[in-house]
């Protein structure tokens, strides 16, 4: 019998780099100043990234987690305050709040987009609520129309966790055009990377200056006598990372074009496989950056899902289990957790419960592959599930 199984696809590598990164690193090296306060690379990257995302107030930092922590601190959120976060997200979304002494309140996510459920967020608002943190899951932006109205009506702040959403748009608006702080990550797996790194977009000059002070130990740009005006920490990005990220930024638009086309094709192919439910899309998200290709296996037990991921990896797919609901990790309960039990939160977060056990994602480098490779992915997934 002829074996019709596709060979392991040879997907494009990640991270991607070429002479643009080499040139940038040499440029940073030879300028003779490797610190952001005296070099040019971080300043240039902030300006270029801000222009691309619709905000002139960009601040590069050490990583995406620090970007969130700095944003929470700049907003003055601390002990006694609550921040509403999606239950299905990476733990940094909640820990950035919790480490500053505030309480992270998990709410469920939309079953189609995996982004924060606006109705669930509204139901969780209390007199202590200071902010809602939508996470643009896997590059699909949250319902920014409904969230903006909810925040305005309730008199609370929106803080976008855009770690997955470089280049994404909602109804034609870029992440920096919603009048709220937004944070990004440049960790090794992200759509742009320098191994680590982060950035905060601010809606105005005042918040930007406040962020600059706190990311530089409270020290103004021109200070020579150690007059620290605020508390803070050292979240400064170095010149070498910024030089690499400038090169990465030059590719993001073309790469997103490819991921958009391949993402739509792969979603349609996966949707034809019995037992597979791909992440859906709200067409108001007219530019999905596709950080990952996500799908769900409804009704599958977590241990079986894990075994399927292992088998997909054996077949050559860069597959991963989805996030665990944040309240189902020990770290969530160490500090700044709500006065509820795990079971109580789980009861009001059925979608996050299901995604914890049933979700799978494929690295976004798969979506830089060919149309035939999208068909090969679908075939491998279908064969793996049939074998399981």
Image (cartoon, rainbow, N blue to C red):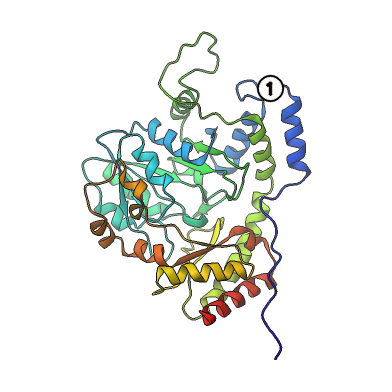
Q: Residue at x 58, y 31 (%)?
A: 237
Q: Is residue 70 above or below residue 108?
A: above
267 and 13: which is toward the camera: 13
Q: Residue at x 71, y 65 (%)?
A: 10
Q: Is residue 42 left or right of residue 123?
A: right
Q: Which residue is mark 1?
A: 33
29 and 169: which is toward the camera: 29
Indicate the position of residue 359 as horizontal and vertical percent values. Answer: 45, 65
Q: Residue at x 58, y 80 (%)?
A: 383
User: Residue 349: in sight, yes or no?
Assistant: yes
SS label for mark 1: loop
Q: Is residue 263 above or below residue 214?
A: below
- Numbered-mark total: 1
Outermost residue toward the top in this view: 225
Answer with the quarter of the image where residue 19 lies.
top right
Indicate the position of residue 92 as horizontal and vertical percent values. Answer: 43, 45
38 and 318: which is toward the camera: 318
Q: Residues within 10 Å of mark 1 (few under 14, many from 20)?
A: some
Indicate the position of residue 161 as horizontal and vertical percent values. Answer: 45, 46
Indicate the position of residue 254 as horizontal and vertical percent values. Answer: 68, 54
Outermost residue toward the bottom in this view: 1
Image quadrant containing the N terminus? bottom right
User: Residue 287: in sight, yes or no?
Assistant: no
Answer with the quarter of the image where residue 54 lies.
top right
């Amino acid at each position: 019998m002829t074996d019709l199984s596709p060979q392991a696809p040879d997907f494009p590598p990640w991270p991607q780099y070429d002479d643009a990164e080499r040139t940038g690193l040499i440029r940073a090296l030879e300028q003779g100043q490797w610190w952001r306060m005296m070099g040019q690379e971080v300043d240039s990257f902030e300006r270029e990234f801000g222009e691309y995302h619709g905000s002139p107030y960009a601040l590069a930092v050490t990583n995406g987690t620090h970007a969130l922590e700095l944003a929470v601190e700049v907003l003055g959120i601390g002990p006694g305050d609550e921040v509403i976060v999606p239950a299905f997200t990476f733990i940094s979304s909640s820990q950035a709040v919790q480490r500053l002494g505030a309480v992270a309140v998990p709410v469920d996510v939309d079953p189609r987009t995996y982004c924060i459920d606006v109705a669930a967020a509204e139901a969780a608002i209390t007199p202590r609520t200071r902010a809602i943190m939508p996470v643009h899951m896997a590059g699909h932006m949250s319902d920014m129309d409904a969230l903006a109205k909810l925040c305005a009506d309730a008199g609370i702040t929106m803080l976008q966790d855009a770690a997955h959403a470089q280049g994404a748009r909602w109804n034609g608006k870029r992440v920096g055009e919603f009048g709220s702080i937004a944070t990004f990550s440049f960790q090794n797996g992200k759509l742009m990377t320098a191994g680590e790194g982060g950035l905060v977009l601010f809606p105005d000059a005042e918040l930007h200056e406040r962020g600059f002070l706190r990311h530089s130990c409270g020290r103004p740009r021109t200070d020579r006598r150690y007059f620290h005006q605020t508390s803070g920490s050292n979240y400064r990005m170095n010149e070498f990372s910024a030089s690499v990220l400038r090169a990465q930024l030059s590719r993001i638009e073309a790469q997103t074009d490819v991921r958009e086309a391949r993402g739509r094709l792969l979603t349609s192919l996966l949707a034809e496989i019995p037992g597979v439910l791909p992440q859906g899309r709200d067409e108001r998200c007219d530019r999905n950056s596709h950080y990952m290709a996500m799908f769900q296996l409804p009704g599958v037990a977590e241990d079986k899902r894990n075994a399927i991921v292992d088998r997909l990896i054996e077949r050559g797919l860069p597959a991963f289990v989805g996030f665990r609901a944040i309240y189902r990790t020990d770290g969530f309960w160490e500090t700044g957790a709500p006065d509820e039990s795990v079971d109580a939160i789980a009861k009001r977060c059925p979608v996050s419960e299901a995604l914890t056990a049933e979700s799978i994602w494929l690295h976004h480098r798969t979506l830089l592959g060919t149309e035939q490779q999208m068909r090969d992915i679908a075939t491998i997934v279908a064969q793996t599930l049939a074998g399981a």
